[in-house]
Amino acid sequence: MTSKNYAFAMNIKGIKDRTELVLPGAHILRLATTEEASDISRNIDALRGGLQMIKFHWQQQDPNLPSGHFRVDPDPSEFRFFVIEFQDMAETLELLQQAFDLSPIELEIGFTRRADGGMSWKPSRLVYLDAVDRETLAEISSADVRETAVITEQIHAHNHGVVNVRAAISELEQLKGLPHNSQLRILGYFALIESLLTHAPKGTDPYDSITRQIKKKLILIGNRWPDRINYTGFGSIAMERLWSLMYEYRSAVAHGAAIDLTVKLKPLGSRERVFSLAKSAAKAVIRFCLDEPQLAKDLREC
């Protein structure tokens, strides 16, 4: 049992220029106390089947050991776990997680622990622990929190009658329950994009295909919000060609075809890069629908 309600923020390694951050809903992101760190350590072992070595990624370097070496059985105070302190189990914590799913830094809540000893978690979130390493841990800043606060308000005020973005956000969360290297993620990201941006193509119009709609509309969104879709690593490849290749990759997955990234699909680079772009695009489309729901509706129909 701990003295406060807290949620374990699995992927945070530090806060830029601060000791704590106030999140939407008056929740506080801060370093775990020794009591909380001990509780988190025990729960990671229990929830992930005793994978003690995974905690290495949150362990602080011992100055008495060579670089890269850590204590085999460290004291809980040597772990840099971050938590979100909250007052109650109101909807704001769930809303906050949805907003972070759409933010550049996707803060991941592993489980929540109430001061009375109660505990809750979503198994789909804990899949993150299977792929955690020091590179996946992120620093978070006040600017990240401000952006997440805007998204939180947009989700809260969302009008289901125009474009049902909350359903898409829920589906984005469900995709996190798949293994990180599952090709089904690609199908899921494209399904989300198609559901929000496309209409059923007219069979008599060759220019109305789903592929053409996706290419044109993603390029439009990228031009309107150039920082929303992460094209890092793709160099100077033309956007229309890039999305044509992405759709070929998606189609190969859907039809069980072999995927060769050394010939025609070589500009895509790697599976990881493909996954990153598809996920970034799906998040950008959902953000677009939150920013301008009527425009999103009109764009889907054209």
Image (cartoon, grey):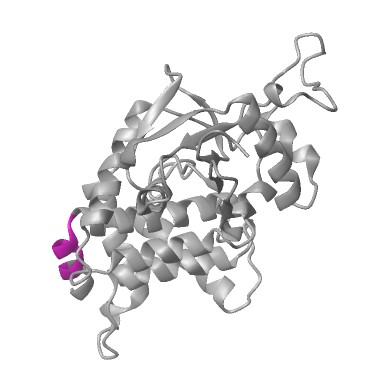
Q: Position of residue 278 (x, y in %)?
A: 46, 57
Above or below, 264 relative to 110: below
Say whether residue 15 is left or right of residue 265: left
* SS assignment for the magenta stretch, majority: helix
Residue positioned 46% across, 44% down in the render? 106
Q: Nearer the viewer, residue 210 or 133?
A: 133
Q: Nearer the viewer, residue 95 or 270?
A: 95
Part of the protein shown in magenta = 292-298
Quadrant location of residue 37? top right
Q: Residue furthest top?
A: 64
Residue positioned 32% across, 78% down in the render? 209
Q: Residue furthest bottom?
A: 204
Does 293 lie within the magenta span?
A: yes
Say whether residue 1 is left or right of residue 273: right
Quadrant location of residue 73? top right
Q: Position of residue 194 (x, y in %)?
A: 36, 71
